Image (cartoon, rainbow, N blue to C red):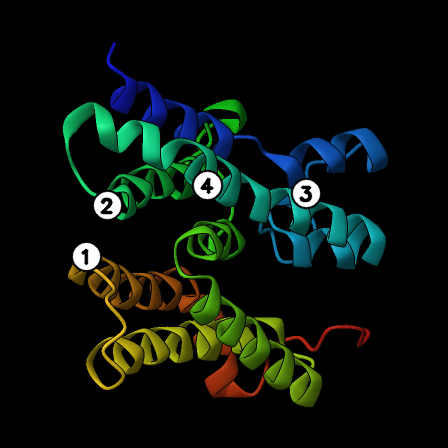
């Protein structure tokens, strides 16, 4: 197996680490996918098991996207003669796919937002930081995690486009397309949340159900 394919496989395996599922079983003796919102993600872990466990899951999920992209992109790209950013996109996409459909948890995972954040933190750190800042502002004002994620993903894509085409930051076109695709993916994976938002029924973090 060549270096590029091995790197993509490592990305998928990293993404497949079901941190929320494993911590749910180890700490609470439960399947987090059958509790709370049913999502295998940091927010649901925080609601069911406590904020500190949710933060731990969140850090792991970001790392699943960041580490393989940060450490493997350059080596993987040299193996097939493409730009490191493009190799990083493929490796990161594999990590996100692993998070959505984890081999180690019956192919039923989370929504991939934090793993995508990790990937873009390695590839587009300035734009990723802007997205995190927007998420923080929206969450602070509303206490709704899903709304923060949706708006932050849109803001992230806008910042990427503006920096590339207004300020002439030399981002490869593939990264611009990827930023738009990730905003669409966040919208797709949050369909149920969007329906609840439109009905005014979405849960606010810290509020009792």
Q: Nearer the viewer, residue 203 or 127?
A: 127
Q: Nearer the N terminus, badge 3 or badge 4? A: 3
Quadrant of the rendering where the N terminus is positioned: top left
Q: Nearer the N terminus, badge 1 or badge 2? A: 2
Secondary element at image label 4: helix
Secondary element at image label 3: helix
| Contact? badges 1 and 2 (CB < 8 Å) | yes
Secondary element at image label 2: helix
| Contact? badges 1 and 4 (CB < 8 Å) | no
Circle 3 residue: 32
Image: 165 above or below 66: below
Q: Nearer the viewer, residue 146 or 164?
A: 164
Circle 2 residue: 86
Residue 155 locus on image (x, y percent): 41, 80
Residue 28 locus on image (x, y percent): 83, 37
Residue 33 locus on image (x, y percent): 61, 43
Nearer the camera: disc 3 or disc 4 = 4
Q: Nearer the viewer, residue 2 or 84?
A: 84
Mark 2 neighbour class, 10 Å CA radius: few under 14, some 14 to 19, many 20 or more: some
Circle 4 residue: 70
Say if residue 36 shows up in the picture: no
- As measured in the structure, the alpha-carbon distance from the residue carrying label 2 to the one carrying label 3 is 34 Å
Mark 1 neighbour class, 10 Å CA radius: few under 14, some 14 to 19, many 20 or more: few
Which of the 4 image quadrants contains residue 153?
Answer: bottom left
Circle 1 residue: 174
């Amino acid at each position: 197996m060549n270096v590029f394919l091995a790197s993509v496989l490592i990305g998928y395996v990293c993404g497949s680490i079901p941190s929320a599922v494993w911590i749910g079983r180890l700490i609470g003796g439960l399947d987090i996918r059958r509790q709370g919102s049913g999502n295998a993600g940091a927010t649901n872990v925080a609601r069911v098991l406590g904020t500190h466990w949710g933060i731990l899951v969140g850090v792991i999920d970001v790392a699943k996207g960041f580490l393989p992209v940060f450490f493997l992109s350059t080596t993987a790209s040299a193996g097939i003669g493409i730009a490191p950013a493009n190799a990083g996109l493929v490796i990161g996409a594999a990590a996100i796919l692993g998070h959505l459909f984890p081999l180690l948890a019956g192919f039923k995972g989370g929504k991939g937002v934090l793993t995508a954040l990790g990937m873009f933190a390695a590839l587009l750190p300035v734009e990723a930081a802007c997205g995190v800042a927007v998420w923080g502002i929206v969450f602070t004002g509303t206490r709704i995690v899903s709304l923060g994620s949706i708006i932050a993903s849109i803001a992230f894509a806008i910042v990427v486009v503006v920096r590339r085409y207004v300020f002439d930051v030399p981002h490869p076109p593939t990264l611009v397309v990827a930023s738009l695709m990730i905003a669409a993916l966040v919208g797709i994976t949050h369909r149920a949340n969007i329906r609840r938002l439109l009905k005014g029924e979405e849960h606010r973090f810290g509020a009792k159900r």
